[in-house]
Amino acid sequence: MSRRLFIFDLPDRFVPGTMGRPGQRTFFLQARKGRAVVSVGLEKAQVSALADRMNDLLTAVNELELTSDGTSADGTSADGTSADTSSPDAQPTAHDDQPLDEPIVEAFRVGAMALSWDPQAARVVIEAQPEDESGEYVEAADDDAEGPDLMRVRIGLGDAHAFVRRAQELIAAGRPPCPFCGEPLEPTGHFCLARNGQLN
């Protein structure tokens, strides 16, 4: 089977999302540009880790590109208010709380991800590869026929901030934790180790 590359430069939409009820949710990353929609499956912990790393990256970029007039690269001034910026990609993106686009067909299950900043284009670059035996990210040129499948998405700062916000809300919308042991509570309760296995 030939290698598949799913490349999205400034997609119309790039979001994390789920299918199913809390406790039985399946997590996806989904990119859409025009009529092309690609979804890859991953774990809740991977969504959380990607959001945390992206948030750290945005903070570092903001600090690195602080201009002399006190305005950051994402158009936010030092006091947190918005300021004019020449790049429309840096403008905050409207909150997207819509479900994933249909059809949701898993192109592959994510094993490794990479996150980087392209300073020339002022883009956040996200790459995802399928699961394999090593669990490591594999460096491969796009024209390498033997490399792993790849989803690469390049988004502006505004879309990156929106991605982090949606991912954080998605993670928080899961099952509430048990106040005694911290494990997720099922609708029917759970056997709490902190209470000697009593049903909470």
Image (cartoon, helix red, strand yellow):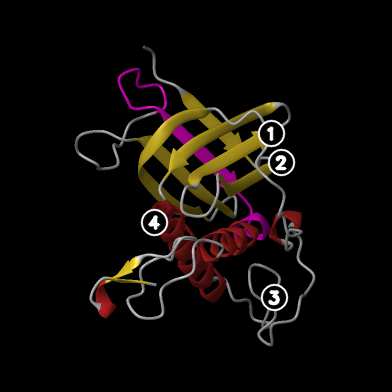
Q: Residue furthest left?
A: 134
Do the numbered discs 1 and 4 sit on residues whose CB atoms are within 8 Å?
no
- Separation of marks 3 and 2 at Cα, in angstroms: 23 Å
Q: Secondary structure at mark 4?
A: helix
Q: Is residue 143 above or below residue 94?
A: above
Q: Residue furthest right?
A: 84
- Separation of marks 1 and 3 at Cα, in angstroms: 28 Å
For image coordinates 55% across by 44% down, the residue present is: 20
For image coordinates 67% across by 31% down, the residue present is: 102
Magenta-span inclusion, residue 69: no
In the image, taking residue 169 as reference, residue 75 lies left or right, namely right
- Separation of marks 4 and 3 at Cα, in angstroms: 30 Å
Looking at marks 2 and 1 on the same chain, the residue that comes earlier in the sequence is marked by 2
| Camera-side mark, 4 or 2 | 4
Segment tinted magenta in the rendering:
142-160
Residue carrying label 1: 33
Magenta-span inclusion, residue 155: yes
Residue 76 shows which numbered tag? 3
Percent coordinates x, y for residue 126 in the rendering: 48, 47
Q: Secondary structure at mark 1?
A: strand
Residue 12 shows which numbered tag? 2
| Camera-side mark, 3 or 2 | 2
Residue type at mark 1? Lys
Residue type at mark 4? Ala
Do the numbered discs 2 and 1 sit on residues whose CB atoms are within 8 Å?
yes
- Separation of marks 1 and 4 at Cα, in angstroms: 26 Å
Quarter of the image with the C terminus is bottom left
Residue carrying label 4: 45
Percent coordinates x, y for residue 122 in the rendering: 59, 55
Residue type at mark 2? Asp
Callout 3 crowding tier (Cα within 10 Å): few <14, some 14–19, many ≥20: many
Residue type at mark 3? Thr
